[in-house]
Structure formats: C-alpha cells, structure tokens
Amino acid sequence: MTNVTLIAGGVGGAKMAEGFDMCKEVELTIIGNIADDDEFHGLWVSPDIDTIIYTLCGKINRSQGWGVNDEGHRALDVLKELGNETWMFLGDRDFGLHIYRTKRLKNGDRPSDITHDISQKFGITSKINLPTDDKVQTRVRTTEGWQTFQEYFVRDKCVPDVLELHYEGLSQSSITPEAESSIVNAELIVLAPSNPLVSISPIIEIPGFKKALQNTNVPIIAVSPLINGKVIKGPADKMLASLGHRPDVLGIAQYYKDVISHLVIDEQDSRFFEDINSIGISPYSTDILMRDAMDKKRLALKILEIFCTLEAKA
Ligand code: GDP
C-alpha cells in the first residue's frame, strides 16, 4: 500500500481523485479546496468538496463533471418565483446536502467532521480532509471591480479579465490537524491538475501548509492542468495570462517551483522538458487528458510508476 495525499480543487481534482481511488494499491487522502465556498439562500455551499464527494460516491453528473446525476430544479424554480437570484445552479438533491451541512455548522460542528461524516454515509472509502476549518474565501478583482469567486465564475461565466486575487481570511486561518498529518504521513504527495491560482494556492498558502510541504522529503508531483497552453475546462489559462504568468506548462512549473519536485505534462508539451529541468523540476510526459474512468486510472498508475522509479533510485 502507498499512502498518497492528493491536493485537489473541483472538476480536475475530482477526476484525479477518482483515478487514485480506483487503484487498490493506494491508501488515498484528499485535501480539497474550501475557498470557493459561499452562502446561497441561507445555506453553506462547498462546490469543490461536493464535486469530490459526488464523484467518489458515484452520484456525479458525468456529462457536466459537477452536480448530481438525475437532478431536478423545482426548489430553485420556487426561489426564482419568489424573486431570488438563481444564477448559482443548485439542484433539488444537491439542496439536501447543503441543508445537512448548514444545520451541522449551526450546531457548532467542525467543517472537517461534517465532511468526514458525509463521505462515510455516502460510502466513500478514501479520506477527504479540509485544509482548514476556518473561513477562507477567494475574491476576484476584474475589470468590473471586486467580486466573490462564484459571481465571477458562475454568474459572469469567467468573461471579465482577472486583475487581482485575494484569499480573504487566509492569513488568520490555520491548517487542520488532519491535513497536517496527511502531509506528514504521505509517501507521495500529488497536486491534481486543478486551477493553480484559485484551487491549489488557497490550500497550500494556508499558514503552516507550505511549511509542512517543505518539511517532507517525499516526492511532490504535480499534474499540469494545461495541455498545449490550453485548459480542458475553466479559466486557468486566461487567469494565468492576465495575472502575468505564462499560460503553459512552463508557467505551471514556475508557479509551483518552491513546492514540487516533479511535473507530469502531456506528450504534446515535451518541447518544454529542458526549460522545466532548468528550474529544478523533473518533467515526465504522458497522455494527461482524462476522458473516462480508464484514463483516470491509467494516469494514476503512471504517477505511481514514476514514484516507484524514484523509490528504486533512492
Ligand atoms: P474547478 O474548481 O471545478 O474549476 O476544478 P479544478 O480547479 O480542480 O480544475 C480545473 C482545471 O482542471 C482546469 O484548469 C482544467 O484544465 C483541468 N482539467 C480538467 N480536466 C482535466 C483532464 O482531464 N486532464 C488535465 N490534465 N487537466 C484537466
């Protein structure tokens, strides 16, 4: 068994999580992003964590990569009729989860405990840890001014250029004991192919988190969320460019250079090998597009194979 700790955002993160979850030789712990969380209709919604939960328990809407399969919108229709803004799609079955989470938060339960209980009740065997139990929320300054993350991402469909990011509450937050021990006990740490700016950074920038990563001597392998300078989905390429980073695998390597030891890139990006090596990161190339379950498992196994080669050399 290999203890793998995966640091993950939503859709890209959940795909990678499913890949490792399918490998019987892996004991998987996921540390998910909570900085996309927000309140809607009085309920606390945690989109990235829920995407991971729905993916691993099989309730996910596979064609979207988020939300629940066989979903309705009757609750949202009523809210609309009553004059509420309903640009944040929350399905009827999904509402049940948000009601449960909010009720437990109101009882004073730790967000980490609530997440563990939901995972267990939904039959998930991999562990899902929160990076912090404190409130951290990504704010986005676009050409339209400062916005919440979901206003930019869902309401405005990522159209305005992002000029600045701020993770509200981050400097006062602290790492959970569960997240810290899953870094200390990991034999391999993987950064999922998630948005580095709004999914991975708000996790690893939590005080104590980066230090925990820097104190381990196990391999830290990232998978690029970009192939040939383009995202599979979402605004990461556009955001990297408007915030002054290179929107390609070299930009990903530069962004993670203080954190990772290895970067898995697509075969189409092999021309960047030398440049990535020159900044002290070892590149590996393979097909990193996860179209289906087989692709997810294949990529997870490839990462384990890289890990085994490193172990053999050590
Ligand atoms: P979000 O919070 O739902 O946006 O999800 P993430 O941050 O986890 O994932 C968004 C990133 O996942 C985007 O930058 C995508 O390019 C990347 N992504 C999605 N599917 C794949 C895939 O199959 N392979 C790779 N390498 N990246 C992917």
Image (spheres, helix red, strand yellow):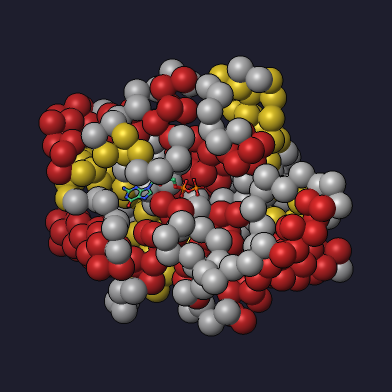
Residue extending furthest toward the front: 81
Q: Residue 167: x, y in percent?
A: 65, 35
Residue under the image location 50 percent in, 53 percent down:
10
Does the rendering let one see residue 180?
no
Q: Residue 74: x, y in percent?
A: 72, 65
Residue under the image location 15 percent in, 43 percent down:
267
Q: Is the residue 266 above or below the residue 42 in the image? A: above
Q: Quadrant of residue 27?
A: bottom left
Along the line of sight, the residue nearer the viewer: 220 or 292: 292
Q: Quadrant of residue 185?
A: bottom left
Q: Is residue 250 left or right of residue 108?
A: left
Of the 4 image quadrants, the one containing the C terminus is bottom left
Q: Is the residue 296 above or below the residue 210 in the image? A: below
Residue under the image location 48 percent in, 65 percent down:
61
Residue under the image location 42 percent in, 60 percent down:
63
Q: Is residue 114 left or right of residue 253?
A: right
Q: Residue 97: x, y in percent?
A: 69, 69
Along the line of sight, the residue nearer the viewer: 112 or 293: 293
Along the line of sight, the residue nearer the viewer: 136 or 147: 147
Q: Residue 233: x, y in percent?
A: 40, 43
Q: Is residue 281 left or right of residue 35?
A: left
Does the rendering let one see residue 200?
yes
Q: Is the residue 210 above or below the residue 294 in the image? A: above
Of the 4 image quadrants, the one containing the N terminus is bottom left
Along the line of sight, the residue nearer the viewer: 194 or 228: 228
Q: Quadrant of residue 166?
A: top right
Q: Is the residue 127 above or below the residue 242 in the image? A: below
